[in-house]
Amino acid sequence: MGIFVLMLIGLACVAYACGSWVYLVSTQNWQEVKIKMLESGIEVRVDSAGFYRKHWYCPVVRYEYEIDGVVRQSKCISRDKRSVWFSTESEAKSYMQQILNQKIAFASVSHPHKVVIMKGCTSRRKEHLVVIVLAGVLLIFGGYLIAAIG
């Protein structure tokens, strides 16, 4: 029974990572739209545990774009929502500068309310997904080996 659970967890890891990858790269076929920045800034979040305090920094924007004569607004930078928090303010400001240099965003053809400034995902998120896939494969293979030996 334990071997089955081990292999099932491995399969779930692989499925999660692959599904996340497909979700993140789906922006590759989205149409370009011109954008106008309305607001920008850095949001700060403080996590504290006892005497330990950790600051996290996140670029925040609001912009408008037009599709089929309809002007819309968005705050979405990327579909990769987990990677927009940075541990240093300088990293967040550097990423913010990349965003502010953008003159176009990418909108879903079938859902024009879905729009992002940055396509795909960050290299940090890609590495995260690769690790999850490898862990899943190792769990599946490990379960198979234990079943074969036992």
Image: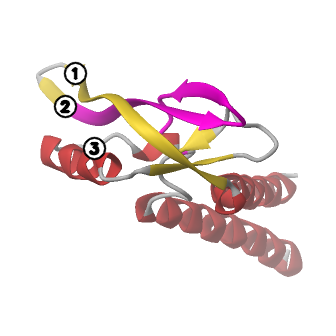
Q: Position of residue 111 (x, y in %)?
A: 77, 37
Instruction: Quickly name the residue at label 3.
Output: 86
Q: Which residues are magenta?
A: 55-78
Give the number of the disc on residue 54: 2
Rendered image quadrant of residue 107: top right
**From what the image shows, is residue 13 above or below residue 33?**
below
42 vs 85, nearest the viewer: 42
Query: Which quadrant of the rendered structure holds the C terminus?
Result: bottom right
Q: Is 67 covered by the magenta stretch?
A: yes
62 vs 48, nearest the viewer: 62
Q: Main secondary structure of the magenta part?
A: strand
Q: Mark 3 belongs to which amino acid?
A: Phe
- Which mark sits nearer the N-terminus, 1 or 3? 1
**Residues packed near mark 1 inside 10 Å, few (<14), some (14 to 19) or many (20 plus):** few
Instruction: Quickly name the residue at label 1.
Output: 48
Asked whether the beta carbons under mark 1 and mark 2 sit within 8 Å of each other, the answer is yes
Q: Is residue 37 left or right of residue 147?
A: left
Mark 3, mark 2: which one is toward the viewer? 3
Q: Position of residue 44 (x, y in %)?
A: 23, 25
Q: Mark 1 belongs to which amino acid?
A: Ser
